[in-house]
Image (spheres, helix red, strand yellow):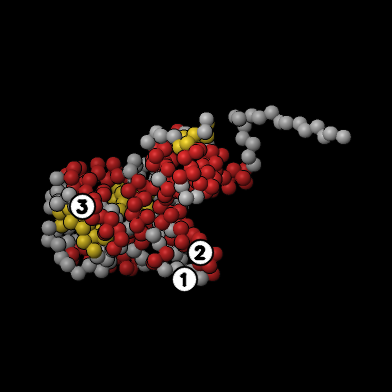
Amino acid sequence: MKVKRIKEKSNKKASTIPNHLDFLSKGLSCHALCLLKYSGILDIMLRGEEIQEKSLQLYKNPSLIRAALATLTSVEVVVFDGGEYYLTPLGKNLGEHIGSIFLPLVGYRNLLANQYNLLNNPSSWKESDIDFSSIAASSVDFGLYDLDPLILRIFHQIKPKGTLCDLGCGTAKKLIEICAQLGIKGLGIEKDPSVIKANEELTKNCSFVEIIKGDITNLHEVWEDVTTAMINMVFHDITPECSCVKFLQSLRRHFPRLQCLLIADMVSMSEDCPSVMPGFDYVHGLQGMTPRNYQETMQTFVDAGYSVINEVAVPNMPNTFVWVVVPSF
């Protein structure tokens, strides 16, 4: 006796994926998108080019690439049609903001892989577990559309004279752009040797910017020419609060002509800032840290002897602010 199989009518408008599987698909899709970025495929697709199914054989692990594309197809980030993969409008938007995804999932991938051990041994992580090169590279994309234009606009308002110092400059791309637009000199201080190595390609034709190796919390020199400084997404890592206060106070010794300091940073969730920047608290929790919230950050400025003369909430970036602070005595 034959069993009659009844096919349900497909309804493309209504989702047929249960909520728990939909949640899983979106989580895995973030990893799949990072994989496409790492492989170079995402950059090809962002240029408007399609990826042919037959071309996947050129990669060392075509099965993995195919699986990543299929995962992204399930959440309508990628479309597969006529033997070709291409980005949807959603996929293009995600690709343009890939730094927001790439930074926590790739820069902190070793900590994420070790999170179950860190649950019971919070001090077992090592600084080498953090991929600072990936973090520096993805930071270039992280604030490209929302944060960077805001910082540049504020600097145009400040109109700094003298040298601008970027404390923890990463790739120095932001510093180069700001100094080029304002027609001023720049000094970048970066701790990680691999990031400095990557900087050489960017700065070799920029005589107006100098990059040096140094720990911004343990500086030894005095720079009389620096009148303005900035700290971009580094401030929250300077803990505990007493160390952060000492760091801010030390800048007035190392930069005796410092007129203002621009700080772009995130804060942890609190009653006053109940939203959450995805990944921010999580990656710091993996290091056994709870980043400062808004009130604690404000108190740090006060304790260090600085006054906030301007505060701007960064659009489309929860719990993220730009502060312009000046020495208050």
- Mark 1 lies on a secondary structure that is loop
Find residue 35 and name its label.
none
Tag 1 residue: 124
Mark 3 vs mark 2: which is more N-terminal? 2
Q: Is residue 104 above or below residue 17?
A: below
**Closer to the camera in the image, 246 or 16:** 16
Residue at 18% across / 56% down in the picture? Answer: 210
Question: Decide: marks 2, 1 in contact (CB < 8 A)?
Answer: yes
Tag 2 residue: 114
Q: What's the CA distance linking mark 3 and mark 1?
A: 36 Å
- Mark 3 lies on a secondary structure that is helix
Q: What type is the residue that disc 3 sits on?
A: Thr
Residue at 12% across / 61% down in the picture? Answer: 224
Marks 3, 1: nearer the viewer: 3
Tag 3 residue: 203
Mark 3 vs mark 1: which is more N-terminal? 1
Instruction: Count residues near mark 3 (Cα–Cα under 10 Å), then give few for <14, some for 14-19, many for 20+.
Output: some
**Closer to the camera in the image, 35 or 91:** 35
Q: What type is the residue that disc 1 sits on?
A: Ser
- Mark 2 lies on a secondary structure that is loop
Residue 326 in sight from this viewpoint? no
